[in-house]
Amino acid sequence: MKTLQEKKQEVVENFSVYDEWLDKYEYLIDLGKSLPPYPEDKKTDEHLIKGCQSRVWLDAKIEDGRLWFSADSDAVITRGIISLLVDVYSGCTPEEVAGDDFGFIGEIGLRENLSPTRSNGLVSMIQTLQAIARKNV
């Protein structure tokens, strides 16, 4: 299993392949398409991330001391963003997620290239991941 640092570096490398943000958005959309199906019975207010313009559901389970996330969204780019976060942070310990600076998001320029409402949604997604992790530390 890859370390958190290796997964974040892989994201930075994957985004660096593209020069234009239009291509990076397409990459995000493709990531969203790769999300496993999210159970309909988990699409509840309890799993809804507050602060996102789109609806984003996030669930987590802990197995052998590691967090495993599943998610979905009703918007394609937002689905790609949550997919990116799920891919990077699933399999990490709660301590790793709670203590991470999410600096790779800045390295790929994601926040700067999102609309203000999507950028706020990204912050809400990160805060929710960290809150889940802190509950399990």
Image (tube, grey):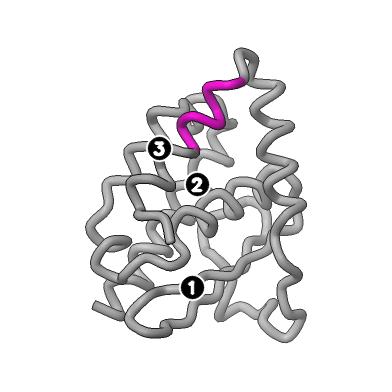
Element type at mark 3:
helix
Q: Is residue 125 magenta?
A: no
Q: Position of residue 28 (x, y in %)?
A: 66, 39
Q: Secondary structure at mark 2?
A: helix
Q: Which residue is mark 3?
A: 9
Residue type indicated by callout 3: Gln
Q: Nearer the N terminus, badge 1 or badge 3?
A: 3
Residue furthest front as drawn:
1
Q: Which residue is mark 1?
A: 68
Image x and y of residue 49, in percent: 54, 65
Question: Which residue type carries mark 1?
Answer: Trp
**Residue 137 vs residue 40: left or right?**
left
Q: Residue 98 placed where, x, y %?
A: 27, 63
Q: Is residue 121 above or below residue 132?
A: above
Label number found at residue 122: 2
Q: Residue, x 41% and y 43% (percent of image)?
A: 8
- Which comes sooner in the sequence, label 2 or label 3? 3
Magenta part of the chain: 11-17
The question of residue 14 being in magenta is answered with yes
- Specify few, some or many for label 2: CA neighbours under 10 Å numbering under 14, 14-19, or 20 or more: many
